[in-house]
Image (cartoon, rainbow, N blue to C red):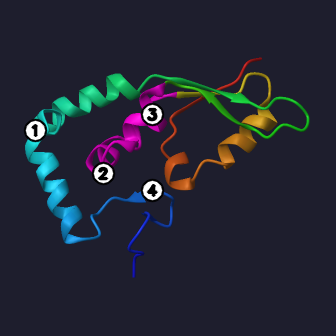
Amino acid sequence: KRPTRGFHTYKGGLLNVMPKTPEESQKAKANNENSPLLRLPRELRDRIWSEALGGQTFNVKGVGHRSPASFDGGSNAISLLRTCRQIYSETALIPYKTSVFHGGYYLRKLCHALRKIKPALRQHINTISISV
C-alpha cells in the first residue's frame, strides 16, 4: 500500500505520478482542463518540453581527489519537472535523452557520477563525451 503523504517511486527510481486520493484526482483533472499549456495537443507540448529541457550539457564536477563526483550544469529549466504530475510524466526523461553528459579528462569521476544516476533514468542517456 502506498503512503498517504509524500511521494512514491517505482523500483527503478521514477516517481509514480498517479494521484493518491480522490481530491488529488479531481485537482489533476481540473489542472488538465483549465491550464492553457496542458490543453495544447501532446505533440506541441512535446516540442515545447524539448526546447525547454533538451540539448543541455552536464559537466562532471568534483574533480579533486576527495570531492564526490556529480554533474553540474544544465539550466533552471529542470525545475519545470516539479510543477505538476502531468508535466513530470511528460518531461522526466527528456534531459537524459537529449543532453550531453561530459566528463572532461576525468573518466573515473564520470563513471562514478553516472552510477549515481538512478538506473531507470541512466538507461535513457544517449550522449556521453570525454576530452582527450
* Residue 61 falls left or right of residue 67: left
Amino acid type, residue under disc 2 in the picture? Arg
The numbered dot on residue 85 is 2
| Residue wearing tag 3 | 78
Q: Label 3 sits on what residue type?
A: Ile
Tag 1 residue: 39
What's under tag 1, amino acid-wise? Arg
Closest to the observer: 72 or 124?
Answer: 72
Q: Earlier in the sequence, mark 3 or mark 4?
A: 4
Q: Where are the magenta residues, as a range? A: 76-99
Mark 1 vs mark 3: which is more N-terminal?
1
Kindly identify the residue that appears in the image at 39 percent across and 41 percent down: 81
Which secondary structure lies at badge 4? loop
Q: Are marks 3 and 4 in contact (CB under 8 Å)?
A: no
Q: What main secondary structure does the magenta stretch of the protein show? A: helix
Query: Quick one: 12 or 79, which is closer to the camera?
Result: 79
Could you tell which of marks 1 and 2 lies nearer the N-terminus? 1
Q: Is residue 85 above or below residue 109?
A: below
- Distance in Å between CA atoms under marks 3 and 4: 15 Å
* Quadrant of the frame with the C terminus: top right
Indicate the quadrant containing the N terminus: top left, top right, bottom left or bottom right: bottom left
Secondary structure type for disc 1: helix
Residue carrying label 4: 14
Picture residue at 17% right of the left edge, 29% below the top: 44
Whichever of callouts 2 and 3 sits on the residue coming sooner in the sequence is 3
Task: Please state which of the two labelled residues, at mark 4 or mark 1, is closer to the viewer.
Answer: 1
